[in-house]
Image (cartoon, grey):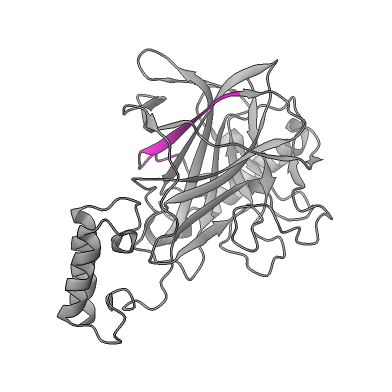
Amino acid sequence: MRARDIWVWAGICAGVAAATAQQDKPALQRLDNAIEVVPQRVAQARYVGGEFRVVSEWGGYSRMRNQCPRGKTRFFDCFGDNDSDGYMDDTGGCFTTSTSRWFFGTAYCNMFVTADHSVWGGADLNANFTRVDLAWMWACNDLESCLVAVFTQDSVPCEADSFDYSGWIFDFGPLSCNPGGYYFANISLSSGHWPMPPGGTGSHILFFAQGQTSSGALVPATCAQPMLWGTEYGGDNQRGTQATEQFDDVATIDGTHTTSECYTYSFGLCPDPLGAMVQFWGRDNSDPCGYSDHDGSGRVNTLDVLSFLNAWLADDESADCNCDGVLDTQDFLCFLNEWNACR
């Protein structure tokens, strides 16, 4: 069931949930202090047998190579990053402080969230997400290890989670609880990606954990919640759109989403609607044959294949054709396919 098929169902869900959302959730508050953190390690994760689990070995985290040669751009911005620098620089007329964002207070716990996205029209729909920016409130007693898992999936607002794709989990180590602000991170992958749902419309999942069991199952955090912003914030460089509904595991905190946990996030505030504070990056669709002219001669011919091959053999990041941060045979195949289509 895709977006065009579920709007009636989602509207019914939203109508039921809207009646409870304003009662069940505490009043929204503003928080100003943004504290940047960087993951210490990363692993692949998946929803298996009713649990979020780590499904690979942990590896050290390193930021992706400087800039993908294909043109890195924001596909979806529910973060407020008007100048594409990974920082909350846009107020959209909502606040006078650029880092001000909404949340439900330090006692509110929402460790499993599903929010939707429809990507910017200039996105390359054949590409994938290679970076995510996100922000969250971390609440507990003193210190607690902070793990954040990010997944994408095909399902859309208030449609049952489909768990189509594996995702990635990031371990930030012990973080101070209630630090007088909120945490944010700009996370790029040195290898791998998040699959983009077909057509660029789907949803993303956030899961906040404090550790894992011996079998790899993730242990939910004591208390966490995503910070909130919106795609309709009035910036000059907005990217993507979102609906008014979001799944929150709060009616019964059990690691599942039910129809009663489909909440409307249209609060009549600025911006409106609100949603989990997330930003995805990928590759734009400008100049589809520009990369095939690898030697910059203005013509696509066999010299471009030689230019690409030399860069690839030299481990030059200009040969990262598929923008996954790793130079391998997939990049060579990527280039040959594009070169063949453009010559």
Q: Where in the figure is residue 298, as x and y percent of width and height?
A: 30, 87
At a point 73% along the width and 26% down the height, the residue shown is 178
Work out whether 338 lies above or below 259.
below
Horizontal relation, residue 48 to residue 225: left or right: left
The picture quadrant where one finds residue 152 is top left
Say whether residue 168 is magenta: yes
Question: Start and end of the magenta stretch?
Answer: 160-174
Picture quarter containing residue 44?
Answer: top left
Q: Position of residue 242 (x, y in %)?
A: 59, 56
Residue plotted at (34% across, 52% down): 324
Asked if residue 45 is positioned above or below residue 114 in the image, the reply reads above
Residue 103 percent coordinates (x, y):
73, 38
Residue 160 spot, x, y in % from top left: 46, 40
Q: Residue furthest right?
A: 96
Above or below for 200 versus 132: below
**In the image shown, does 260 or 140 lie closer to the viewer?**
140
What residue lies at 76% left-to-right and 53% top-to-bottom? Answer: 98
> Quarter holding the C terminus?
bottom left
What is the tally of numbered marks visible in this picture?
0
The relative height of residue 57 versus residue 100 in the rendered view (above or below) is above
